[in-house]
Image (cartoon, rainbow, N blue to C red):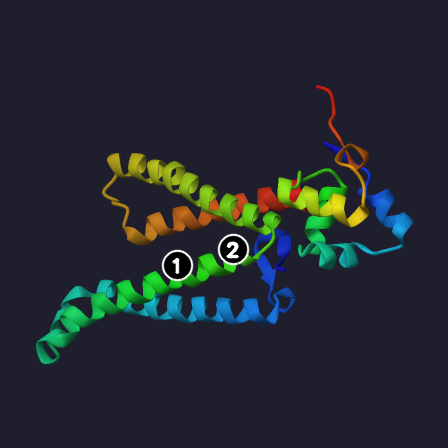
Amino acid sequence: MKNNIKELRSAKKISQQQLADALLVSRQTVNAIETGKFDPSLTLTIKITRFFKKNLEDIFKMEDK
Amino acid sequence: MVKVTHKGLWIDFSSIKKEHKKIMNKSLFFALITGFSIGFIMSDIPFFLMICDNYPFLLYFAPIVTILTGVLTIFYSFKFYDKQDELYQKYHDFTLMAGCVGFFFFGMILQFVSLFSTYSPSFMDYFFCVLLGGVIGQLYFYKKYY
């Protein structure tokens, strides 16, 4: 699963720590999601979409295998 | 939220929130008492029974304390686990799972070795199998996700 959280975060001019605080997760979790190492749960995904005020498809992109 | 450090083998205590630290401290306190009472009963049974001759209540009291504090340790550690983020929860689950795999894998090796020698694995040997499995799991998880 690919995502453009890093770009959206840069556009909002907020750090990983600030995003982590808003989502109530650790900075390591934000970093792992951004780098595509970790796929967030549905709850966290909804929190991310609400934070950036975007649709799910605008943030996350499913890779075709 | 907990920050995992040292290639997955340690956590940064200062990264934990104040209210979560309280829960963790309670969990560690009860774990300490549980470990002490288990050690007291298991380390040398004749020694324990000898003390029980003079203080018979210990014969019943020590196991009850062990069970009670053990339950409280589990309760508070789950409370702490529940309040952490999902990556840490995954790390925690993976560590436990790797510990179980370590127990079976290394435990079977120990059992196999014991067939051809006079050595017979004890509780501590199996404990170290769990520990070794857990450590390998933590290193792997950190490399993959952090």
Q: Residue B42, position in %: x, y?
A: 23, 62
Q: Is residue B126 left or right of residue B14?
A: left
Q: Residue B39, position in %: x, y?
A: 29, 66
Describe the element under mark 2 as helix, strand or loop: helix
Please tell me which of labels 1 and 2 falls first in the chain.
1
Q: Which mark is residue B74?
A: 1
Q: Pick whichever, B113 or B80, lies toward us.
A: B80
Q: Pick whichever, B109 or B8, lies toward us.
A: B8
Q: Are marks 1 and 2 in contact (CB under 8 Å)?
A: no
Q: CA distance from mark 1 to mark 2?
A: 12 Å
Dot 2 corresponds to which residue? B82
Q: Do the residues at discs 1 and 2 belong to one chain?
A: yes
Q: Residue at x 27, y 63 (%)?
A: B67
Q: Which mark is residue A27?
A: none
Q: Residue B54, position in %: x, y?
A: 10, 80
Residue kind at label 2, given as amino acid type? Asp
Q: On the rendered image, what quadrant is the N terminus of chain A found in?
A: top right
